[in-house]
Amino acid sequence: PVIVKGKDKVGKQVSFSDVAGLDEAKLEIMEFVDFLKNPKRYEKLGAKIPRGALLVGPPGTGKTLLAKATAGEANVPFFSMSGSDFIEMFVGVGPARVRDLFQQARSQAPCIVFIDEIDAVGRARGRGGFSGGNDERENTLNALLVEMDGFSATSGVVVLAGTNRADILDKALLRPGRFDRQVLIDKPDIRGRYQIFMVHLKNIKLAVEPETVAKQLASLTPGFAGADIANICNEGALIAARNGRKSVEIVDFEAATDRVLGGIEKKNRVIS
Ligand code: ATP
């Protein structure tokens, strides 16, 4: 499988300025950035840097984005894989993928490995809930634990993982030397939503000042995650284009908000 995603699709480095809000999370993750940039400074003092951190929060709140931006800030390669990619029909594929991922990462250290949806592999063992392939999942989890223990604290591989359910994870994953830090990534409040709108309105041709649009939309969108906001900005532009406008107006974003809200409600209905 293709694992390396050093840069995003257009080859642009993602930096903290692409991540709106999440000030506390950025502050916590800065420790890893500093370590990846100056490993010697830590080694000299005998300091053991945490091996990894869990980014915990609801879907679409920017966990992947923050992990990518951490790599961008430290200017190191970014390897990413989703927990569900490890789980395959065929026995042995999951553990092999874990080993491959870490082998590649070690050869390019210092670097960041990001595992999205870690709960797909990291759910507490012996609880079932996964239709078939449970042993395979446990073997994959064991392979992950072995890999995380297998490199020294100074090998320069930082492992970040995203989940929206830290409570269902196997406790073995949370032990010191593994994911011993948790960074909370919550849905944005009105100020956060304003900032996320400002980021995503940057490249859109607007009829009025971005501040005005962002302020109005932020108050219309309680409960929306960053991904929904990015969606509204793009949908708004699509609606304006379809209507043959020269620039995007607030009514276009309002229509887009309704549409995105419809999508969210549909998703919730499927889940519940
Ligand atoms: P999931 O749990 O579903 O994997 P996630 O938390 O990893 O979601 P991302 O994939 O990082 O979410 O976010 C999706 C997109 O939403 C980002 O690529 C970005 O465009 C937008 N986004 C989310 N949060 C923010 C934010 N804080 N600032 C700017 N953009 C954001």
Image (tube, helix red, strand yellow):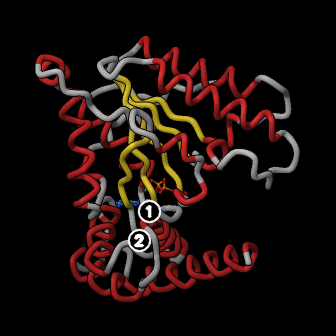
Which residue is pictured at 62% across the width and 44% down the height?
A: 122
Q: Quadrant of residue 142?
A: top right
* Residue annotated with mark 2: 187
**Residues packed near mark 2 inside 10 Å, few (<14), some (14 to 19) or many (20 plus):** many
Quadrant holding the C terminus: bottom right
* Residue type of the residue flagged with mark 1: Thr
Q: Is residue 79 above or below residue 222?
A: above
Farthest right residue in view = 132
For marks 1 and 2, the one nearer the N-term is 1
Query: Are the residues flagged by discs 1 and 2 in contact, CB closer than 8 Å?
Result: yes
Which residue is pictured at 45% across the width and 48% down the height?
A: 64
* Residue annotated with mark 1: 61
> Where does the image place residue 93, in percent across and percent down from the top left?
75, 24
Q: Is mark 2 within 8 Å of ligand 1?
A: no
Q: Quadrant of residue 138?
A: top right
* Residue type of the residue flagged with mark 2: Lys
Which residue is pictured at 37% across the width and 32% down the height?
A: 51
